[in-house]
Image: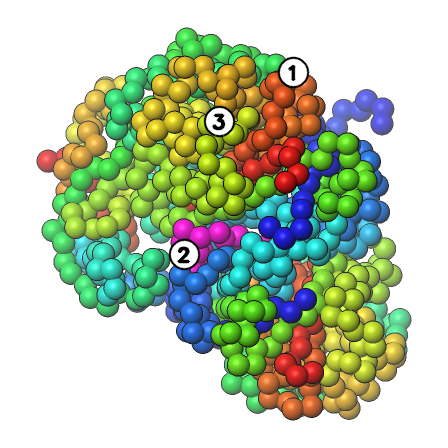
Amino acid sequence: MKIGIIGCALVGFADEVKLRSDELVFKAAKAALDQAGLTREDLDVSVITSLDAYDGITISNGLMAPGAGGYEKDATRIQGGGVGAIMSACASILSKSAKIAIVAGADATMFDDPIVSNAGYDAFFRRPLGMFNQAGYGLFAASLLRDRGITEKDFAALAARNYRAAAQNPNAHRKKSYSVDEILESPMAFWPLRQLELAPVSKGGAALVLAVEEKAKELSREPVWVTGIGGGSNPYYGAWSDLVDLKGLKHACRKAYSMAGIKDPAAEIEAVEIHNPFAPFEIPVCEALGLCQKGQALDLLLGDKKLVNTSGGTLGTNPPACGGYFRTIQAVECLQKNGRAGRAVVQDSDINLGFFGETYHVLVLEKAGV
Amino acid sequence: MENIEVLKKEYNMHLDFSVSLGPAYTKWMMGLKDKKILANKCPKCARLFVPAKPFCEICFEEPKEWIETDGTGTVECFTVNYGKFRNFPDPPYVLGIIRVDGSAVSFVHWIAGFSYDNPEEIPDKIQIGMKVRPVWAENRKGDLLDIKYFEPY
Amino acid sequence: MNKKVAVIGVGNTEYTSNRRETRSKAELAYAAVKGALDMAGIGPADLEASVFTSVDGFEGNVRPARVLEAFGQGLNIPLVDVNTGGTAGGSGVKEAIHMVSAGLYDLVMVYGSPTFQGVVDNQQVLNTASPPIFEKPFGLGAAHMGSLYCAGYMRKYNFSMEDLALVSAKSHKNAAQNPYAHLRKGYTLEEILNSPMVAWPLHMYEICPNSSGAVAMIFASEEKAKSLCSTPVWVKAISSITDTFLTGYRPYNGFPQLKILAQRVYQKAGITKPRQEIDVAELFNPFGPFELMEYEALGFCGQGEGVALMRSGATEINGDIPCNPSGGTLCTNSGIAASVTRHAEVVLQLMGKAEGRQVESPKTGLAHSWGGNDGQFHTVCIFSLKED
């Protein structure tokens, strides 16, 4: 598979955006189309990613659809993350239903994150216990601490690394750097995670224009190619050990790598953008993605042995709906900026709602001439 | 599974939201505060919009020009509600699709200003194409309900 | 389309009212999915991806798919969550079709959730989909979204209440014979016209009920379809169309966007004479008279001729273009399950498995869905027994 990314745009990201979601998605979509040198007329399909509860409207894609270029066109809305929407656009193109697709989204509405994520749990077994996203992150981090001997200082070091990178990224939401000590001194939010080890909720918009191979070559000098894509899920009432083993993510990887022809990820992948709403999540994800052996992730990350989360990661920028687009666009930029990097992987998920019943997505990107 | 009488449980979801209206929507709403129904115009297809749009969905351009309409319009469609529904106004009420003169698009508001005493007769008092004008609320704050309703004239 | 796609299994539960429902969402999901897998002759381990369709806001759960385990999550397969309002069924089916046609996955399931199960007040809930700030404050609920269209249509062509109510009587009559319908009272024209007026010009029996039940479908690649199924139903074409968000932009006397969409889909499917070439159609009619406007938009008759077509008998089960032989959404509206069901019903008709409501030997069928804030979206899908 070879689908070209021929235009991208990021708008925002901040604590708040002074626009409604239809206006914000329009800005992102128009900018991406402009970059691709195309107009709305050239689009065959428009895919939005969003969640009603993030937007404050039931069937919220209705408000955003025209702003994403979808008026009088074939359009749809995928819930559960940007890379999931990219997968839908790729399926449209590969099934020959479209030659040019746009994926877009906007996080504009202010909502109560813990309440919305709590409402994502069933009303009888988990919601009444106050289960919500950060609680789940705490549980996962606790198992890293107690079952794997990773320390709280390691957590802080990983967070500090992300903040350092975010401070260098003009696209990032949080641009302030923190030292390991400052992070260790921040209040305990959900044991064993401290406040500065948790991601913010960012507002902003994003869009990408994708094209079938022949069109991409015609329209863009050297597009970055999408060469593999896969998804996987975990059950809601499953075994805890399977959850921390990230079985759903590994399932997604197998598919994406097989499509992209990747046999040895540690050797063949140079860059990766990870969805880590809590800092230490980078460790199990690097391992599940096969970037290193189990137990070697800390060394890989702190030694900067690969380009991991050069955007600053999720601690730097975390728009709940557009996050997958943000990570994909940053991975594209990372490939374009780093001569030695030929392949990047984007790991996305819906764990902004928390763990249990979550879905993971993996995208493989390749620079031309690899 | 043997026949047991299953449990029935009740719950509700209460979610609060807050949004910013961008400059186009804001300007239009503030116009209502001054008892003005404004329209903006697409620079490419020249369509006028009441309510104002932040971008034209066909041309994908941002309107820049604004004009003031006199607020009168026509009824494009209507329905009369007779059911009692939670959190909705008491029946009967009339929902109208109103097109302010000159606008390429229409919007929703109430039609009132005549007797509702014989509810079954209300549909007979309304014609599609009927002319209506806004009746303003006393206290206005830059909200669609600054218009109390549209009345036939 | 790239590679061929066929439907090889459908799973249906029985339907009842939400008030009387005692099955949990998990039980309904299991029953529908199991039914589809059984008909397809495969097990859960054969599924490669699942598509879940519903409208979160109506379910009282953000991302309800996550808390259910019936969609292969135990085997870690990808779960795609599609929410485009009332068209989520059509959109979900479209995702599955694209995934198989793209060569990404060979066996994909689509599940239509009982969206309204658990909802205490539907009008209020539908109002949460009404544009906030611009339309929501006016008490615009589901019934009004329907009645506005019917009012405009009625006034434009000077139809009578009886003209409009005839098509609902047909749906009720058909549903009475459908073991998978909710309302099976077979209300007559007289009973419909005597039922209370809810939102002018619609009487209660011209408006869908609040149903509970679920449906699942299995989509397969050509190779899998031919090895597993004796009557695979092939997908010829599917697409969707998008209108503006604010209700006020609709003309309210027909479905012009559906007309545009139909022309596109007919072209992709190679259909030039829909009235002759389509043998059965399931059209989205949560408000009975919608069906009349859909006849016109889909080219089964000319503009303003919907009532005449209905009166001619052509759209009855034994007519030349049977529409809603199942009774349609008017008699069974389990939320987004009703949106997937339009597709499932056409498939069952083509397979000859439409118990109690079978049309005689249909070869080509059309499934339509409608939804979003007052019909912002439509989808149309053409199925056929003919592979090429």
Q: Quadrant of the N terminus of chain A?
A: bottom right
Magenta region, residue range: A64-80
* Residue B66 position within the rendered picture, expressed as x and y whole percent measured from the top left: 19, 63
Residue under the image location 24 percent in, 60 percent down? B45
Q: Residues within 10 Å of mark 2 (few under 14, many from 20)?
A: many
- Residue at the (46%, 32%) spot, across then down: C273
Identify the residue under disc 2. Answer: A66
Q: Which quadrant would residue B130 be assigned to in this image? A: top left
Q: Which residue is mark 3?
A: C276
Task: Indicate which label's residue lies in the foreground, 2 or 1.
Answer: 1
Which label's residue is closer to the chain start, 1 or 3?
3
Residue A76 among those drawn in magenta: yes
- Is residue B77 shown to the viewer in this render? yes
Q: Is there any visible trace of residue B9 in the rendered image?
A: no
Q: Amino acid at mark 1?
A: Gly
Amino acid bearing label 3:
Gln
